[in-house]
Amino acid sequence: MDNSKKFRDNYNKFIMHHRKLVIVARRILYIAIFMALVILSKIIVGEQINSILSNSEFVVLLASALGAITGGVITYLINIRTMFTSNHMKASIINKKVIYEPLLLDFKNLHNELNVGKVIHFAYDADFRTIGSTLFDAWRRIKQDSRYYQMPDYYRKECLDVESKINNYEQCKTQMINTVYDVFDSVLKNYKYRIEENEGRIKSFIRIDNVLNNQNFAEYVFSERQIKGIPKVTQKDIQPIVKEYEEQFMETNVIAEYNKSKDNLIESLNIVINSTETIIIRIADVYEKRNSLL
């Protein structure tokens, strides 16, 4: 079942990215099927058709009946197709504005900020956005209403993959902060010092940017004014603590894990940005141009 869904998603994505090629292939297939049916019918019922066509009155009645039926069926099918195409065209134009364009804006903004090395602090609500945060609210809003079901399955999966990569990125940031704190706390204990309180406030002094730039948190803490919860350390213990903290932190892999999560997020964004741009271009070329001519 999973293989079937995967094949269908890949098929739909191929059609979206290679629409002209698919149209040509379909037309060639239809012509081939038609020619095969003509040849087959001539072989099977060729003699019977010749004898029937020799009766002129029957031919006239048959032609009239076939003409009336064919004309009615064609008219009905054209009306159904026109109505379906019109509704689909209007829905696609609306979706371009309320789904794909807002998503593309958020995806590209996030991608650009990651590429310049910025540590991302996500804001999922424009009304509660903090200074320096990156707004990423389009996907959350779309996921909460019917628009979530109006996009192709393969595209929805690409958006969900970006969401998964964002969650992993956030977890790596949290893990980095916790590791910095835990290493610092462990080194203090080696020298008979203990952090008795205010863990959350102490962690708030840990900046991901500084950690990535190889800042020694122990050295930073001792150079700052007294932070509540940090024990008073004698002057002779400061440098040994700073050195041991550096050695222990270097043995962790939190920075490597963060960089890996960042690279995975960028890769996922590359895929979904390409798909989003393709969908927008198709809607603009196929539906908006046609709608402007109506």
Image: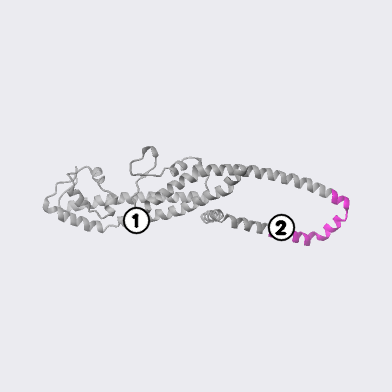
Q: In the image shown, does 25 or 65 lie closer to the viewer?
A: 25
Residue 53, position in %: x, y?
Answer: 85, 55
Q: Residue at x 85, y 49 (%)?
A: 60
Residue at numbered disc 1 = 259
In the picture, measured across the screen, residue 275 lies left or right of residue 243, that is right
Instruction: Of the two numbered discs 1 and 2 on the same chain, state the one appearing first in sequence.
Output: 2
Q: How far apart are marks 1 and 2 (CA)?
A: 57 Å
Question: What stretch of residues is rendered in magenta?
Answer: 31-60
In this picture, residue 228 sits left or right of residue 253: left
Kindly check if marks 1 and 2 are in contact, taking CB atoms under 8 A apart as contact: no
Crowding at label 1, few (<14), some or many (≥20) Cα neighbours within 10 Å?
A: some
> Which image quarter holds the C terminus?
top right
User: Which amino acid type corresponds to the residue marked 2 in the rendered image?
Assistant: Phe
Q: Left or right of 93: which side holds 133?
A: left
Please give the residue where the numbered disc 2 appears in the rendered image.
Answer: 34
- Disc 2, SS: helix
| Residue found at the far front of this picture | 293
**Label 1 element class:** helix
